[in-house]
Image (cartoon, grey):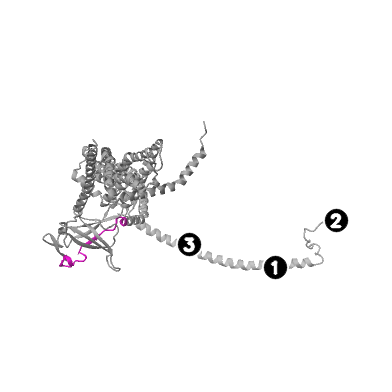
Amino acid sequence: MNPPNTNAWIDNVGQRTLGAPTGFWNRVRFGRAAVAATFLVPKADRAALRAATAAQVWRCGVRQLPLVSFVGLALGVLVIGQAVSLLQEVSAQRYMGTVMVMVVLRELGPLLTAFLVAARPGTAVVVELGAMQFGGQPVKADRLGLRALRELVAPRVKGLAVAGFCLTIYLIAVALVCGYVMAFVQGVPLRLPEYAGQLADAMHWLDFVLIALKAGLFGVVIAVVSCYHGLERMLRIEELPAATTRAMVEGLGACVLLDAVLLLGYLIR
Amino acid sequence: MNEVQPMHEEVKARRIERWVGVFVVMAVLLLLAGFGYHLYHTAQRKGWLLPRAPYFTLLQSAEGLNIGDPITMMGFNIGELTTITAEPPGSDNKVFIGFTIRQPYYGYIWTDSKVLVTASGLLGGRRLEVTPGKTGGATVFEEHNQITELWIHDHRVAIDKVKKGVHLQPDEDAALTARAEKLLGQLEVALPNILAITNRLNVVLDNTSVLLTNSSALVVNLHQATAQLAPVISNAAGITANLRDVTGNLRDPHGSLGEWVLPVDLHTNLNASLVTLTAGLNDTLLNLAAITGNLNSQVQSNDQMLAGISKLVVDTDNLVQGLKKHWLLRGVFPAPKPGTNAPPKTAR
């Protein structure tokens, strides 16, 4: 049995540390190229891109709707269930709408949707793009041409952005509706118009802008990160799980970071 | 078969596109519906679609007030604060506060309405509350559900010529924090006196306790004394009766004790005795004067005798001194020895 090679581990840390800026700038360059290829499409390619995007939205959005609805239901029930027991102790049921807006609409809704999108369609994108190299010409993310970007990356970026946006809206809507149903079941004396009024009072116009922005950007970030890791280098089949995990962790980390940046929007209102 | 396959793919793609379209449109509609309801509710709550009348008041401080704060009346949210600006230096009231009141609440605001500035929350916030008018006149005049004129400086002024709005008198309380600070300051000043009073009260209470204990003992003693006084008083009644009898007897000398103690010729005897005593005293005094004179002459003769004796002593001393110097008697009076502390003479 060989003793653990401490020097090799330290070498690995040093190598990763020195390589981190390079990796970061590679991702930024790839992301910039992917976004450009997504939104600057010649007329001739638009029909094909639209069809490919629709397929991605179908796969990453519509087919994820049952799971997202279930998570929204659980979220509404859990938040309201916990909040009701707490708020009833201090006779503050009128803050139920505020709690829902603060917890579900502003933070948990977009983040949970991003988690689901990264966990299911995001990982699928990594595997799909990584597997494409097994049978054909190997491609590298930093060597991709514009046409390859439009065919492989652009539909996924667009599809995940649209799917992320729509799924976030559905998750929030389901959570708010199920929250009211849960409150009704628990016997909270709150009529539906009052609940809707509480929600409307607790909201701000900036909430709608930030939710749309967050949901779309989370989808774009997850798509770019997933595509990058799928095309980063020629993957062997045993490297796919590690690449998938990296993509998911990096995608979620980027989403949380973006969420923190967008939080500044609430501070300047 | 080759023609059927693309058709099938095309139908499938169209179906997917339709479902995707529904998926996206529904999401967008949900978002827009939520935003629309939010706008509608906010418009209802803030009365965006209702006519509003401008009012203002002048305060000493803008502390705890913010633009957008609600204005309340009778528990309703009736408008919002729109302007907070400082007045020019030297003004009596330093801060201009402008606010708008929406329909129909400005109908309650008359010329005698006031703006109460009250504390709000625990963090030093304040809020404006307008009191409904009681005896004044209306401040807003409408035609066809639109504000046409306002009551400014005892005149009706067209709404488009109004610059600031209708002035309402303020009723401003200090901010909660200021009041709390003032109260604390007064408490700090009064605290030593309160402590002194407390100490004095402690002492007074201690003394009162002792006093009560003593009073209790005194009451017990008084009770005993009262019990003992009862037989004394009953005995005193008998003594008083006896004294009254004695006094009656003394007033009448012909009876018992009076006649025995005081004889009838007492005054005559006393006068005779006093005359005899006075004559004896006179003779005694004359004899005493004679004795004094004899004593005086005796003392003077004694003085002459003493002078003779003194002369005799002096003469005797002169005689003895003369005898000392005589050759016959010089040996009888040896010369005085020198000091006794001289060393003894040694044998040669």
Residue toward you, B39 or B33: B33
Describe the element under mark 1 as helix, strand or loop: helix
Number of other residues with Cα within 10 Å of mark 1, as a class: few under 14, some 14 to 19, many 20 or more: few
Describe the element under mark 2 as helix, strand or loop: loop
Residue wearing tag 3: B284
Q: Find the magenta span and give its range.
A: B153-179
Task: Judge whether residue B172 is colored magenta.
Answer: yes
Residue toward you, B210 or B134: B134
Parent chain of label 2: B
Describe the element under mark 3 as helix, strand or loop: helix
Q: Are marks 1 and 3 in contact (CB under 8 Å)?
A: no
Residue situated furthest left in the rendering: B144
Mark 3–mark 2 distance (CA, rounded to whole Å): 82 Å
Residue wearing tag 2: B346
Residue toward you, B62 or B211: B62
The amino acid on which the numbered mark 3 sits, given as a three-letter code, is Thr
Please tell me whether mark 3 or mark 2 is closer to you in this view: 2
Which image quarter holds the C terminus of chain A? bottom left
Pointer 1 or 3: first along the chain: 3
Task: Judge whether residue A42 is colored magenta.
Answer: no
Residue B233 in sight here: no
Tell me where residue B302 appears, x and y as whole percent: 61, 66
Q: Are marks 3 and 2 in contact (CB under 8 Å)?
A: no
Please tell me whether mark 1 or mark 2 is closer to you in this view: 2
The amino acid on which the numbered mark 2 sits, given as a three-letter code, is Thr
The amino acid on which the numbered mark 1 sits, given as a three-letter code, is Val
The disc placed on residue B314 is 1
Q: Say if A11 sits above or below B81 in the image.
A: above
Q: Are marks 1 and 2 in contact (CB under 8 Å)?
A: no
Number of other residues with Cα within 10 Å of mark 2, as a class: few under 14, some 14 to 19, many 20 or more: few
Tell me where residue B216 appears, x and y as whole percent: 33, 43
Residue situated furthest right in the rendering: B348
